[in-house]
Amino acid sequence: MFEKILSRSQFYNAFFGPRRPEAGTIFLQQKRVYILPTRHGLAFAVALMVMLIGSINYSLSLGYILTFLLSSMALVAILHTFRNLVHLRITPGRVEPVFAGEIAWFELFVENRAGYDRCSISLWHQGKAIQCDVASGRGATVSVPVAAQQRGWLAPGRITVDTRFPVGLLRAWSYIQPDMRCLVYPKPGDGRLPLPEPAGETGEKRVAGGGSDDFAGLRAYQTGDSPRHIDWKAAARGQGLQTKVFSGRAAAELWLDWNQLPPNLDPESRLSRLTRWVLLADHDGLRYGLRLPGLELAPDTGESHRLACLRELALYGL
């Protein structure tokens, strides 16, 4: 018999457990908004009951008036608290990639199409609340923080939207689970780790390329060139976009290779070190490639190449 009784956690998961993410705009219709008294509301109800009993026992006309006046105000507060939340529209916004160990910020646009203001709207996640006010016919953008603990895709999960407006005697709330996710890159390794030596380099061989040693001249801008190497002064003079060329080692032969790492490193440590190398190579304006088991990205430069490498590192093996 006892085996058939749901435990507390099973009961919670059955009624309030994870649901499928909701795509597009989430509309808080009446049937998905709940309302119950707060602790202050329960204390207020007890006080009204004591006042009513005292008025009956002592035949206090003013006591009746005060009790029923406060009771009517509480009933009106139920309506105002409920309508402060119902019929809101919540639309998923942007979310920027982050590294493991950082905070991902999920943007939500809260829209109010009603003819009255919505005050003290709170969005709760992981025990933290973000509060906003939404004017009549307007919207507000709210960023919900979510801790990114490991690499890969991160979904915000369920978010609680609630309000205690106007007097705090009642709480109206609803659950939403927006269909959005954040890409979490591996946590960069020790910043003191040097880049690997470019493959195939011997002696003092130097070429004109994407190195960072001595200035060698200008060339026409090419898609993917690092913004740090663009001659912005020449562009301001109307001479078009030109890229500074430096003489240095052949950066095109710099490979960030999974197999070149020490064999005693576990996969996550390898990804962490490769992430640090990608950031260092991009910061120095080098042309670099990435080799992972079953994957190879040709050497290149620029933001798009950096993001492509970080994406592959974030999703490797997932």
Image (cartoon, rainbow, N blue to C red):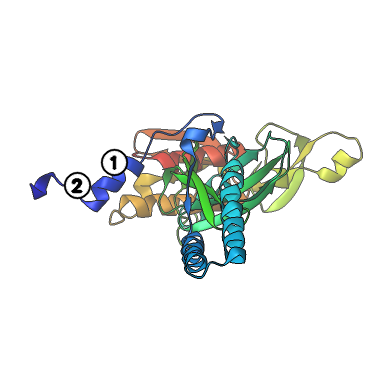
Q: Which residue is mark 1?
A: 14
Residue picked out by circle 2: 6
Q: Which residue shows up at 61% across the image and 53% down it?
A: 73
Query: What amino acid is labelled 2 in the image?
Result: Leu
Q: How many marks?
A: 2
The answer to whether residue 203 is visible is no
Q: Is residue 22 above or below residue 152?
A: above
10 Å crowding of disc 2: few (<14), some (14-19), many (20+): few
Q: Residue furthest front?
A: 59
Q: Nearer the viewer, residue 128 or 268?
A: 128
User: Would you say the residues marked 2 and 1 are in contact, meaning their CB atoms lie under 8 Å apart?
Assistant: yes
Q: Estimate the x, y position of residue 116 in percent, counting from the top left.
A: 72, 40
- Residue at the image point whose x is 36% and y is 55% from the top: 269
| Label 2 residue SS | loop
Relative image position of residue 211 (x, y in whole percent) = 64, 48
Residue nearest the viewer, comparing 74 with 172: 74
Q: Tell which residue pokes out farthest to the right in this image.
A: 237
Question: Along the line of sight, which residue is nearer the eye, 171 or 271?
Answer: 171
Tag on residue 41?
A: none
Farthest residue in the left direction? 1
69 or 234: which is nearer to us? 69
| Residue 123 horizontal/vertical position (percent) | 55, 50
- Res 9 visible: yes
Q: Label 1: how many residues lie within 10 Å, few (<14), some (14-19) or many (20+)?
A: few
Q: Earlier along the polypeptide chain: callout 2 or callout 1?
A: 2
Q: Amino acid at mark 1?
A: Ala
Q: Helix, strand or loop at disc 1?
A: helix
Q: What whole-number distance in Å separates the C-alpha atoms at marks 2 and 1?
A: 9 Å
What residue do we see at 45% from left, 42% from top? Answer: 155
Check the image and name the residue furthest to the top: 24
